[in-house]
Image: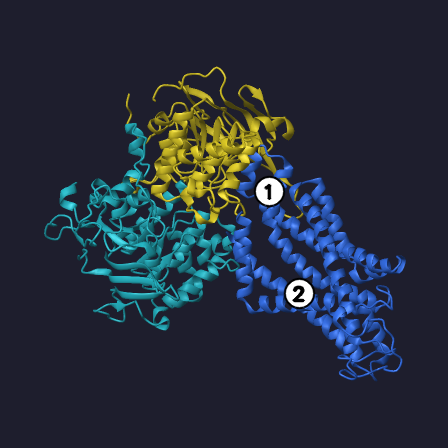
Amino acid sequence: MSGGMVSHGVWRRMTAGRGGVISLLYIGSIVFACFCGPFLLPFGPTSIDLHHRFLPPLAHGHVLGTDEIGRDLLARVLRGGRVSLIVGVVSTVLSSLIGTVVGIVAGYRPGGTRFLITTVIDTVLCFPVIFLLLTLAAILHPGLVTIVGIVTLVSWMEVARVAQAQTVLVRQMDYVTAVMAMGAPDRQILFREILPNIAPAIIVSATLNIARAILLESYVSYLGYGIQPPEASWGNLLNNAQEYLESDPWLAVIPGFVIALTVAMFNVLGAALREAIAPGRRA
Amino acid sequence: MTAPGGGPVLRVRKLGVSFGQTSLVDGLNFDVGRGEIVALVGESGSGKSVSSLAILGLLPGADISGSAVLHAPGPAGDRDGIELLGRPERLLRPLRGKRVSMIFQDPMSSLNPIRTIGAQLREILALHAGLDGRAAERRAVDLLAQVGIVDPQGCMRLIPQRLSGGMRQRVVIALAIAGGPDLLIADEPTTALDVTIQAQVLRLLLDLRADMGMAMVFITHNLAVASAIADRVVVLYAGQIVEDAPAAAFFAAPRMPYSRGLLAAAPGLDRIASGARRLGTLPGQVPPPDERGAGCRFAPRCAWMMPDPCARRMPALEHVAPAGPGGPPHLARCARLEEIGE
Amino acid sequence: MTGPVPPDPVPLLSLRGLSKTYLRRDGLLTRPRAVAAARDVTLDIARGEVLGIVGESGSGKSTVGRMAMRLLEPTAGAVHLDGADITHLSEQALRPLRHKMQMIFQDPSASLNPRQSIRQILTTPLRLRGVAGADATQEMLETLALVGLGPDVLGRAPSTFSGGQRQRLSIARALLMKPELIVADEAVSALDVCVQAQIVNLFRHLRDRFNLSILFIGHDLAVVGVISDRIAVMYRGTLVEIAPTEQLFRRPRHPYTARLLSAEPRRGVLSAPAPPATPAGQHAPDGCVFSARCPHAADACRTRQPALAPVAPGHRAACIRTDLDLEGILPHSN
């Protein structure tokens, strides 16, 4: 299928640029480290060792040191990364699905439906995301499922907008009109003609959304409404570390740096994808 | 090859244009006489636009060889003419718009969308005619009237957006002739226009030629348009000139087999009268630049092709018949001209 | 073909007073005003007939084509296919009839889905007709041969084809629906002369072979003239004249047609005196659409749009100046 040819070209163009290669390598490594790393470390993320509190990095076999109750920081960063990445990816998958469906419907059905949906999207977009997020987090019982749910809830609009704009664009292409003129059912027009042509733009938008979702999770957990201790997440590591910012700065600096780098790398990946896909869209 | 009025305005010799390894155009020789309208005719990929852009130094990144000499009487007193190819941009710029102008298919590509027509005309006049203030204003209005704009004063105050496509092209022509050029290169100037507007613009170009003695290179893919406006027709195929003939002779009896094929494929009105509605077709397609063989480039599609010499040797562009003394030459590139006859 | 087309008891496609009006707002605060893209267009296409529609940009020729296809809802009027009124059929009810009318578009680069192979593109119509397996492949190959392409194209992506080849593929896709009518909207306008000739010949061949009807929409009078049995001329949304091709070229009966013919580029045309200057501007709201530009306009022309009326056998024009002897571009034969 030509989709195969197209994605092959995208892969080639992606890996031809420095940004694509570096971001893919980094993301591959961080995913591997977060999901397999904890099994390879001698310390568990929640094993308390009151004899070794506030160890600086590289002391007593603790690569990144320990926190106020002697838990290994590297183990906690990796464990927290697992939570952050799961939240980022799962909420992005969910919000992309919702956004794609909503966007396609709005793009494909002009008139009342489109007006209604765009109004809803614009209204939701008007809310300051972080307050909406905090309100929801404060009402709901905190936990992994909750945080995935609320991050999804506040981030489907971006994808919906992209999907709608792309659908409107593709819908008026002659090849879609030709299939409409054959009397093809809507389902077929949407899934065979429109979706494959808007998918690249949605994938780019989703990649950028992962970065946003990771950041959102960190905000919420940092403010104490997200993942609850003793379970680690990048956000609550920061929350925990702020008390010791002056005496033991690595407790804040290290998770902060990992968050920033990961978010930046997903953004670089999104940009590289966009670059790589653009020539395919022109064809 | 001398046109009436003492030597050609433009003399192009061995013009070659290539990008890296890919040669788009090679060995182009043609003259444009004073006040003459030469139609450069060809299908897409024939090299007709590329050649004219190369002549004006508007093809950054291309390797350009050969020579294109502009002979234009002027204060520079250039008896030997001005070599355009390889001329530094700094020295080329004063010539553009003053000695030689160019207009394109899309008039918006030469107009600034956010400035008024008046401002753009005054700027050109200051640059090329040294006019400013009242004088520039008067001349601008005159120019707009000359290109057939009904309310030139009103037009001066408008931005291009407010004009129709035909009016925009007229404004572009006014800008192009503001410096009083000796040569106008027009690249498909009427292709985007409706047929009634096209007729008006073509007529305007003919009137300007009559008034100003301006020569023209008219690039087009449309043979009917070429037949309406051209004095001479130069046919390009796969980056080469294959026929160069006075328009009357060309349309009465084209000699090169490709020219014949082109005319047979064009849906002329005479065809409808005769009831012979079936259009002539050529097999195959134009070879891309990297698939041009050593022989005649048209050979693979030619009904008269012979393995030898057609497929082996590139025929030269030769006189079809001994032209009478001073008569306009008719050249064609075909090894079997005599056998094929008229 | 100078005689009238023999009257068909039931034309394949019949457009009855079709209109399309858009509301356009000129400024933020102004009241939207109705702009007619097509106004009261009535015409028939017989089986096996090629009917050309010519007009300049904004004439409404494409609007008429899309309304005929039921791809655009008319504001008023009716579309009859095979004698049945399909104007108000729901998309669901229309679906079984859709295959009878297929469309070919202008832009070869936009007419094939870039994310599908040619095999996938050609499978779509076959699947809708319920043809599958070996039968589908066989029919696909036969149709490709008909449009001059070989079996090697099936695995390729649309982007690997030239403009002319893509138009052939679009035609193959349309033919696989077994249509009775093809609406070709500027289908050869983007092609080079030689390729254009091939596609025009292909259309004529298909008409002869399958008794297809073709609604050939174009702006180039020579191209439309070469392919069409009859030509309808549109100006600003209004059908102003319809006649057998040669008759229209020999003796136009509407001043706009005469203007269009006189503008057709050809040798020596520019040395003839220019047609009288015509002030641009809006015609009287109720008057003839061409009255503002018409050199023959009388007072009556500014008060009412004349209806399309017979002026000769098979020849109708929307002009009250039946006394005019307008210049054609073919010699008078009789």
Pinpoint residue A259: horizontal percent, then vertical percent.
73, 70
Pinpoint residue A12: horizontal percent, then vertical percent.
53, 61
* Direction from residue C272 to residue A26 in the image, left or right: right
Q: Is residue A232 above or below residue C109?
A: below
The residue pinned by badge 1 equals: A192
Of the chain colours in the picture, the one used for chain C is yellow
Instruction: Check disc 2: other Cα within 10 Å, few if <14, some if 14-19, many if 20+.
Output: many
Q: Is residue B253 above or below residue B277?
A: below
Discs 2 and 1 carry the same chain letter: yes
In which quadrant is the C terminus of chain B drawn?
A: top left
Mark 2 belongs to chain: A
Chain painted blue: A
Are dots 2 and 1 in contact, CB under 8 Å? Answer: no
Front-lying residue, B55 or C309: B55
Tag 1, which secondary structure?
Answer: helix
* Direction from residue B93 to residue B162 in the image, left or right: right
The amino acid pointed to by label 2 is Phe
The amino acid pointed to by label 1 is Arg
The residue pinned by badge 2 equals: A266
Res. B340 visible in picture:
yes
* Direction from residue A10 to residue B224 in the image, left or right: left
Pinpoint residue B96: horizontal percent, then vertical percent.
35, 64
Chain painted cyan: B
